Image (cartoon, rainbow, N blue to C red):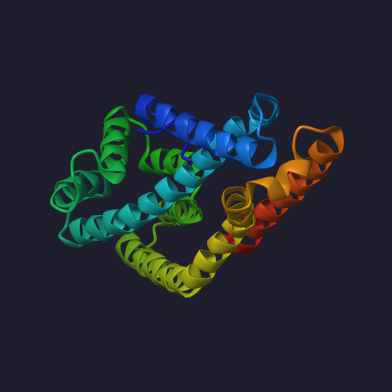
Amino acid sequence: MVENYDLYCFSPIERIRYIIEGLLLVSVFAVLFYRSIFGFVILSPLIYIYCKKKKVKLSKKRQWQLNLEFRDGINSLSAAMAAGYSVEQAFTEAIKDLKRMYPDGAMIIKEFTYLVNRIQMNITVERALHDFGERSGLEDIISFAEVFATAKRSGGDIIQIIKATSSIISDKIEVKREIITVIAAKKFEATIMKFVPAGILFYLSISSPGYLDPLYHNLLGILVMTILLIIYLFTYRLIDKITNIEL
């Protein structure tokens, strides 16, 4: 059970992996733009920025996976309630169904199991769902919790409401998948564009090493390369912002 899906915590292996990747990235920049240990020291904060960006990316990926699993979870919940189970029992039956679709470590299985345990501790389903929605940071789960609570209070047809909600979430996910497919090619092109300037600098350093010598190991050269690096990093960030479409 995750305390906050908006915040991603590296595992020990992931931490080592991404620190090493950050070190390699900084080393490449230090060689291309400065060719000195001084450049590595100056650029070392980029390791922290790189790891932070990875956490955001992995957090988004985890939330997307949770959204997919939640859709299957409420489908199973709807089927259990249609079979005549009460709301509380339906979650237990939904877990059994989900275990046939996902491994035991799946997020939705852990969350539904935690939810069932809270219900057994006399916490209302509405409260448990509300807390789940808050922790997930996902609009679909938050909306479902609110609709479920309203239906429970007003005595509405919960089975039909869950079915309708499941259908809406499924439609939204399919639309998101279509958008991801449409922009995938553009994102790939943008990724290539981000590495072209560094690639050109690398090519010149290998093919004509003496050509760039005036830009290294002197004050004016360091100033010029620093300005170019700032422009490059700004452009890199700008491309990320343009291609990062919130779904």
Residue toward you, 80 or 66: 66
Q: In this view, does 135 lie above or below 203?
A: above
| Residue 84 rendering spot, x and y as whole percentages | 16, 57
Image position of 113 (left or right of 34): left
Residue at 40 percent across and 46 percent down: it is: 62
Residue toward you, 190 or 99: 190
| Quadrant housing residue 224 | top right
Q: Is residue 157 above or below residue 11?
A: below
| Residue 126 rendering spot, x and y as whole percentages | 41, 44
Residue at 19 percent across and 43 percent down: it is: 92
Residue toward you, 5 or 135: 5
| Quadrant housing residue 72 | bottom left
Residue at 59 percent across and 30 percent down: it is: 48
| Quadrant housing residue 115 | top left
Q: Is residue 34 above or below residue 194?
A: above
| Residue 172 rendering spot, x and y as whole percentages | 44, 68
Image position of 45 (left or right of 118): right
